[in-house]
Amino acid sequence: MTHTIRGTALTRRSALKGIGAIAGSAAAVSVLPVAARAAIPAISSTSLAATDPLASPPLASAVARSSQLAADYLSQLQGLPGLSSAPLPDTLYALNCSTRTDITLGTVTLTATSYVDAANQPPAGAVQVGPTMVFERGQTTGVWFNNAMSVCGPINNVSMMAPDSGWRPHGFTMTNLHTHGLHVTPQTPSDNVLLMIRSTTDSDPHVIDQPTSFPYFYTVPVDHPVGTFWYHPHKHGAVASQVGPGMSGALIVRGKAGDGDIDDLLASQCNITAADEIVAVMQTIGYYYTNPTKTQAVFYPAGYYIGGEPAPSTCLDQTLTPGPSHTPTSINGQLNPTVSMDLGQIVRLRLVNASNGQTYIPKFKYTGSGTAPALPGVYAIAVDGIALLPRDPAGTGAYYEIDYSLTAKDSAYYTTAELITLAPGQRVDLLIQANAAGTFELYGAGLGEAPTVVENNTPNTSSLMTFVVSSNKSTKNQSLPTEALFATATIQRPAVPDSLPASGSTPTVPSTMPVATQTLEFKTVDAAFNASGVPVAPAFLINDQHFDGDPGASPQLQLYQGDSDVWNLYSSNDAHIFHIHINSFAAFARVPYDTTNRGYEAPVWYQMPIWRDTIYFDAGTPDDKPNFVPGTMVVAASKQVDFTGEFVLHCHNLFHEDNGMMLSVAILDPETGGYDKT
């Protein structure tokens, strides 16, 4: 139905005007059953021997302004409504969605959908990770996006007006592009995740009206935080099937030298520069074998959701057998790669959790022989692309040191746990200091080994990468940043919500709990699953709603430009990961739930607000215990600034998202009740 908003009736169809966003008008066809809970890939924990040196993801190549790629991009950009005089962006990338047959993943050659840099094609046998794109704040960046994917098994297109399109996986070759965490407009031609871009291989009548390419154009505000972000597909119903085989890449926002932001301060005061950075994209890529020696494999989207094997005639003429029982975690497409350091050296590790549903607690252990030396020091400096706030603006100690020994669930514990738990979609920037010579494995810690916000679930305990520290003393003359450095006024962070106290532009933790304006309950409904473990009704809900896929539908949640919101976020069944597009939020407390007396306890305040766009919480009991028992509640605040338009919030367990755990959100102009012109 259409809701009236301050006198203006808004629907998604009217908001997307003229850009082919409606996925066909034919009668609905049957779609795949939702993934059975047992079929959703389980936690994959593997221990691997160290392999080759870690290779950075390739940097995306800028398209030459005089090239045919640039001409094609500009022609389509200027063909969009209202953009007939649009210029070329300051930087232009070209990204192809294609199916590669030569991906190297450990000992396997994999066939899977992939992001390919059209301006710099990867060599045969290249690993599976998208090129790293660099956006500069205050500048415009374009991405010429083309889709020519083909997949193993059924594509499963469906009319988006079908009643179950919002909660069943479908459309596995339809795609789009999401710049995860960026504060940019959600309107076309920027971060509009409601667009659908079909493959050139797909002529199904349900999708034939959709474009096969799109000219994305992003204007990054001059005060945007510098930091670690990422990009991935976001076509509802197929996100897990595309991120799952590795369609993702890092996106780094940079400023200019001398701007006084965190990158500049680290370089000028600590001698930690871009040359000391390690970009590490974490993925869990499952597959089916296609030959008896298990050296060839293929990614099968439908099997990713419901298991089983297709007929060879529907899977690129391949006969499939099940892949490994444990899916290892790859780093930049490599399995347990090595990083070499000198004694005393500091590196900046930009960790991106690009897995579909795995949560990690990165921790070091000694894997050499003899008496264990001091482990590398671990210091968090940013999460989700935003530099940490200081606890004490005048603090002189190195910041923020991760103390893995904390056990009492007080403010220090929950703050540390929030910083070091890395859920799907989250990023953390860690400074790693080599304190002693030796071989050390960075792995996913289990429960009881480290502070964590995982309480009634199981984190992934796989090997991640190995650090080899030589006995040679580093000549880099580096130092760790002090806490006071993070109080520098020139560090850019999001707008301070009105609900948080602040010292200038720096928010602090409130002394009393502000009143929530938005309360969201995430839950998995076990009763929706049949005896075979397949849902026969919506099973993944937010406030008892699933995503409404109808392009004519009104936004399911409405916010207003300039308003501040306080969010209460919790799960009553299963583990979930809240992610909202466009505006980050400041998390400042967790509120434990007393499962015996059935009520929330006193809040545990963080030591400082922590800016995030993605956050983890789970239910009050494990999955095999009684359902609908609330777990620890997250409390956060955000301010809706700069942009209007429609976007989404959802669970970043991407299986949950594809199966309906998503809501459409609109930020409206409070005067007109509509959207500003982008």
Image (tube, rainbow, N blue to C red):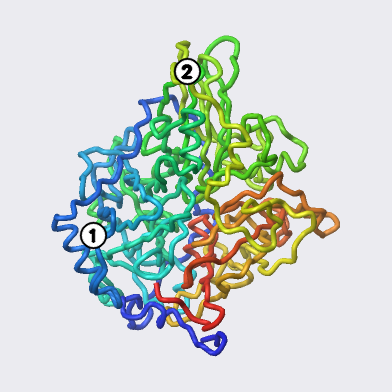
- The span from disc 1 to disc 2 (Cα, nearest Å) is 44 Å
Amino acid carrying label 2: it is Val
Residue toward you, 346 or 37? 346
- Vertical position of residue 607 compared to residue 527: above or below: above
Picture disc at residue 469: 2
Image location (x, y in percent) of residue 520: 65, 66
Residue drawn at point x = 56 percent, y = 79 percent: 670
Up the image or down, 560 lies above or below 179; here it is below
Is the C terminus in the top left, top right, bottom left or bottom right quadrant? bottom left
Left or right relative to 357: residue 94: left
Name which of mark 1 and mark 2 comes first in the sequence: 1
Q: Answer whether residue 199 is visible to the viewer in this image.
A: yes
Q: Look at the picture and state if 262 lies above or below 41.
A: above
Image quadrant where residue 69 sits: bottom left
Q: Residue at x 49, y 75 (%)?
A: 548
* Residue identified by numbered label 1: 148
- Write the residue at 35% across / 63% down: 176
State the residue in front, 377 or 464.
377
Residue at image location 57% in from the left, 55% down from the top: 577
The residue furthest right is 597
Q: Nearer the viewer, residue 319 or 324?
A: 324
Look at label 1 and name its amino acid: Ala
Q: Is residue 311 visible?
A: no
Q: Residue 321, image x and y in percent?
A: 35, 46
